Image (cartoon, helix red, strand yellow):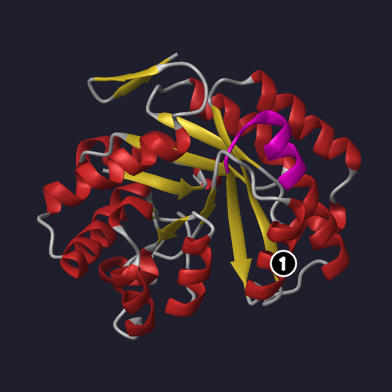
Amino acid sequence: MVDAHCHLDEFEDLEQVLLRAWEKGLEAIMTVAAEPKAFQISIQIASKDPRIFLSLGIHPHYAKEASKEALSMLGFLASSSPKVRAIGETGLDFYKNLSPRDKQEWLFKAHIELAHKLGLPLVIHCRNAFEEVLKILDTEAIPPQGVMVHCFSGSLTEAKEFLKRGFFISFAGNLTYPNADRLREAASAVPEDKVLLETDAPFLAPQPFRGKRNEPSYVEETFKTWAKLKGLLLEEAKRKILSNFKRFFLSNGGGRWNNGMWSL
């Protein structure tokens, strides 16, 4: 199994969290640094284990505080650390509106430009901003290395629009919720080679752990739900998602996958 999106910098008991993940059988984790203060911490975390990879970005919630200097640092770190395999999470959040919309849009465009410049895929956060996200991506040009829509929570119609553009769609623990029929309908329709699965830990724990802190080992519950939707055996589902993870995050740049490890 893999966890295609989580925030390991949020865990004070990280050693125990990772031990449970490896014991559960995870082969790779993509940790996401979502604000400048998490950049160096996340690089250190990823550098200690060949199974941990990193995406760097500034979440739209922090757009009001973002500066050109912070973006410059992001670009330098992303270009100098081989563990950085994506840019983001970035995008628009018009649900909480913790930053002005114009600042969110400016920051989103800057991340798209950086993904183009560095030849890295882009990890998108999109909440209550579907049309605006698509408009910006279509105008700015989609990064050739690809786009992953993380923690997808939209409709089948929205999923189809993302798929038209070749995006990967990642589903999190909310796929397991009893009232998530619309989301499961969308997940059922997404081709198997365009799916990734994640926890978004420490947030959004799957149903058996709902109300508790989420962690990467819990991703198995989302794998079970997705496998059932697609009529797959769990082991087959694990192989397919691992293949997608390698294709999306690890095909850009040097290195090789060998016996469950990525060596640079």
Tell me which residue sits at (21%, 39%) in the image: 25
Q: Nearer the viewer, residue 253 or 262?
A: 253
The image quadrant where one finds the N terminus is top left
Q: Residue 251, image x and y in percent?
A: 44, 29
Side (left or right) of 61 relative to 262: right
Characterize the local packing of mark 1: few (<14), some (14-19) or many (20 or more) Cα atoms within 10 angstroms. few
Residue 226 seen in the figure: yes
23 lies above or below 218: above
Residue 100 seen in the figure: no
Taking the magenta stretch, the answer to whether it contains residue 12 is no
Side (left or right) of 120 relative to 171: right
**Corner quadrant of residue 129:** bottom right
Tell me which residue sits at (52%, 47%) in the image: 7
- Toward the front, the furthest residue is 164
Tell me which residue sits at (76%, 25%) in the image: 76
Q: Residue 178, image x and y in percent?
A: 29, 83
131 lies above or below 40: below
Q: Residue 56, image x and y in percent?
A: 64, 39
Q: How many marks?
A: 1
Side (left or right) of 94 relative to 47: right
Q: Under tag 1, what secondary structure?
A: helix
Side (left or right) of 187 relative to 149: left
- Toward the top, the furthest residue is 264
Report the predominant secondary structure element of the magenta stretch: helix
**Corner quadrant of residue 264:** top left
Q: Nearer the viewer, residue 132 or 101?
A: 132
In the rendered structure, which segment of residues is drawn in magenta? 112-121
The three-letter amino acid code for the residue at tag 1 is Lys
Q: Which residue is mark 1?
A: 135
Q: Residue 43, image x and y in percent?
A: 59, 27
Tell me which residue sits at (24%, 54%) in the image: 220
